[in-house]
Image: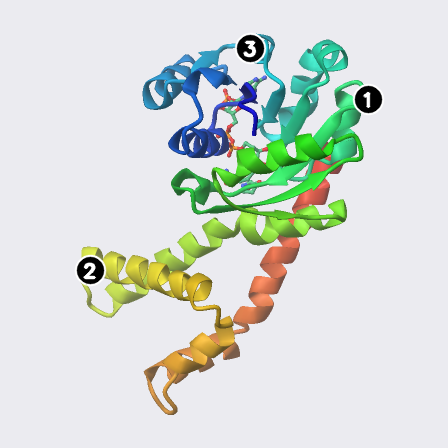
């Protein structure tokens, strides 16, 4: 990446995670500009990362060739409307992290002929342990594609999607996914406490087990079912638990939850058009 100036529009949870990745990987803070309406959040971004923070998108995008849209889907259209004139004259690379909002909507809201990369990162980006799905529209040049990938790679792994229709599925699996794991952690912790463990001990056991299992998944190269079977001694404790999960319909429930998230992506697109 040839050191572009990057403007974030929206300085909330997701933007913070991405900014942490960029600064942590050595991006010069003066090259990161953020538009964020809340003064307390602007000040905390300046303090934590040394970036420049402004009240308006117009100020933040001055001189920036990459615009990172990190506002809620519900306000994306009005935020783009503030920038249409500048987008037409300056032809930036527009990168969106918004759930549901399509590249053709962003192109239209930015006045047409816009180079748009629609992405779906996740909050482990804060630790450089995220994963981002990316989709580029036809206006994106190979160099801009590399730039978008380089920006998101500071947050973790990246994977390109050639069919934009799959972005709602990406969102449902990895964008929202960390929350599913946190829900599982809450449930494991509560169940441990119900079995008589002190709260702190139950929390530590659940969290470290999720970390260790995730590292085995990513580092061993072995599929999840093989790793699961290795824990499951015939007639043992794990088998008792797994049979309970299967009888309770865990797989079907996960499939329904992911389908609901993907469907919501489509609804967010339609509702905010
Ligand atoms: N959180 C997550 O795990 C993920 C989120 N996303 C996507 O990221 C986007 C942001 O989500 P998230 O960070 O969670 O939400 P947040 O509400 O934390 O962040 C959005 C920020 O944008 C600010 N904002 C609102 N209007 C404007 C404006 N006109 N100009 C500049 N900033 C503005 C908001 O301020 P105010 O609070 O005053 O409204 C808020 O601080 C969403 O589109 C979401 O789909 C994608 C992947 C994962
Ligand atoms: O819940 C949401 O809509 C956003 C998108 C993925 C994670 N958070």
Circle 2 residue: 201
* Disc number for residue 112: 1
Residue 183 picture location, percent across and down: 42, 55
Task: Classify 10 Å Cα crowding around label 2: few (below 14), some (14-19), many (20 and above).
Answer: few
Q: Nearer the viewer, mark 3 or mark 2?
A: 3
View extreme (front): residue: 2
Quick check: is the Cβ at mark 2 less than 8 Å away from ligand 1?
Answer: no
Quick check: is the Cβ at mark 3 less than 8 Å away from ligand 1?
Answer: yes
* Residue 268 against residue 80 in the figure, above or below: below
The Cα atoms of the two marked residues, 1 and 3, are separated by: 22 Å
Query: Residue at horizontal 36%, vertical 61%?
Result: 210
Query: Residue at horizontal 48%, vertical 46%?
Result: 130
Q: Is residue 98 visible?
A: no
1 or 3: tag closer to the N-terminus = 3
- Tell whether 182 sits left or right of 194: right
- Tell whether 110 sits left or right of 36: right
Q: Secondary structure at mark 1?
A: loop
């Amino acid at each position: 990446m040839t050191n572009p100036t990057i403007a974030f529009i929206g300085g909330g949870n997701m933007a913070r995670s991405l900014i942490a990745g960029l600064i942590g990987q050595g991006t010069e803070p003066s090259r990161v500009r953020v538009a964020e309406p809340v003064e307390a959040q602007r000040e905390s971004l300046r303090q934590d990362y040394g970036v420049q923070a402004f009240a308006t998108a117009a100020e933040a995008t001055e001189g920036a060739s990459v615009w990172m849209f990190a506002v809620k889907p519900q306000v994306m259209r009005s935020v783009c409307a503030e920038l249409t004139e500048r987008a037409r004259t300056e032809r930036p690379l527009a990168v969106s992290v918004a759930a549901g909002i399509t590249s053709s909507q962003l192109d239209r809201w930015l006045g047409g002929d816009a180079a748009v990369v629609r992405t779906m990162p996740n909050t482990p980006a804060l630790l450089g342990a995220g994963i981002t799905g990316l989709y580029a529209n036809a206006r994106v040049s190979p160099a801009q594609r590399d730039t978008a990938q380089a920006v998101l790679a500071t947050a973790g792994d990246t994977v390109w999607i050639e069919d934009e229709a799959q972005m709602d599925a990406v969102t449902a699996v990895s964008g929202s996914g960390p929350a599913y794991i946190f829900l599982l952690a809450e449930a494991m912790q509560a169940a441990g406490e119900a079995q008589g463990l002190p709260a702190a001990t139950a929390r530590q056991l659940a969290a470290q087990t999720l970390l260790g299992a995730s590292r085995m998944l990513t580092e061993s190269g072995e599929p999840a079912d093989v790793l699961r079977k290795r824990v499951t001694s015939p007639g043992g404790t794990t088998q008792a638990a797994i049979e309970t999960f299967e009888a309770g319909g865990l797989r079907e429930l996960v499939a329904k939850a992911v389908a609901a998230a993907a469907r919501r992506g489509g609804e967010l697109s339609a509702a905010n058009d």
